Amino acid sequence: MQPQTAVTSDEKDDGYTPTPDFEESIVELHVLRYYGFPNYEDAPSDDYDVPETAITENEFRELARETAQLTSARLIDEKPFTLLSPDEIKEVIAHGKKNPWSKRHKRGWPYHTNAFKFLHITYRRWVNRGLSRDVIAKADPGLYSALNVKISKTPEGLPQWLDVPTGAEARMRAIKDPSDREKLKITRSVMRDLKRKYGPSQV
């Protein structure tokens, strides 16, 4: 796996203010490199380890461009998070039951599959569009556990182009008023500090 470099919304070059197109090109390059593509050329990469039964290479390149567009819009505009509707949640859960992490090898995925890649590919209809980890927990508990392990072993956590927050984070980010979001963020931070100091039962 290629080492990951964080993608930030304020990457600049001698005072240059990033534009959406500039941001998209950066994010797309990070996604391609994460999957083993060294550049934008059409030649296939020997490091690309996603089975074509899950997604073809052409479909993946389209997904990389789409991921870049959605990520760029989020980093630049900082719009509130859009939660999935009840019907969409049902679709995700049904999809997860049909494509469980525990049976990934039957669909061509290697046993030591990167859980981030599996999430990105398998749930591409909803990733960066409102999917949160509490929904994944209902759809595929095995994948949810694998994601928690992967996140705990990855210093930077989920890649910025894989926006699948926890349920609590998603609900906080869905608050439209920025001041209300900030108040809730501060309250949660204080509560976490109190729990660490005195224990959950005392707070």
Image: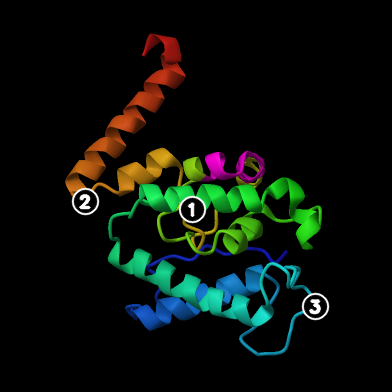
- Disc 2 marks a residue whose amino acid type is Lys
Q: How many residues crowd around disc 3 within 10 Å: few (fewer than 14), some, or many (20 or more)?
A: few
The three-letter code of the residue at mark 3 reads: Asp
In the image, is residue 56 above or below residue 202?
below
Which residue does the image show at 25% across and 44% down from the upper left?
A: 181
Is 20 placed left or right of 110 in the picture? left
| Mark closest to the chain's N terminus, 3 or 1 | 3
The numbered disc on residue 91 is: 1
Residue occupying the point 55% across, 74% down: 64
Query: Residue 17: image x %, image y %?
Result: 32, 78
* Marks 1/2: CA–CA distance: 26 Å
Q: Which residues are magenta?
A: 136-147
Front of the two marks 3 and 1: 1
Tag 3 residue: 46
- Membership of 110 in magenta stretch: no
Q: Does 52 sit left or right of 145 as displayed?
A: right
> Residue 202 appears at what percent x and percent y?
39, 9
Mark 2 Cα-neighbour bin, 10 Å: few <14, some 14–19, many ≥20: few
The residue carrying mark 2 is 176
Which amino acid type is shown beneath numbered disc 1?
Answer: Glu
Q: Is residue 33 left or right of residue 15?
A: right
Residue beneath the point at 59% across and 50% down: 96
- Residue 13 in view (yes/no): no
Observer-nearest residue: 83 or 117? 83
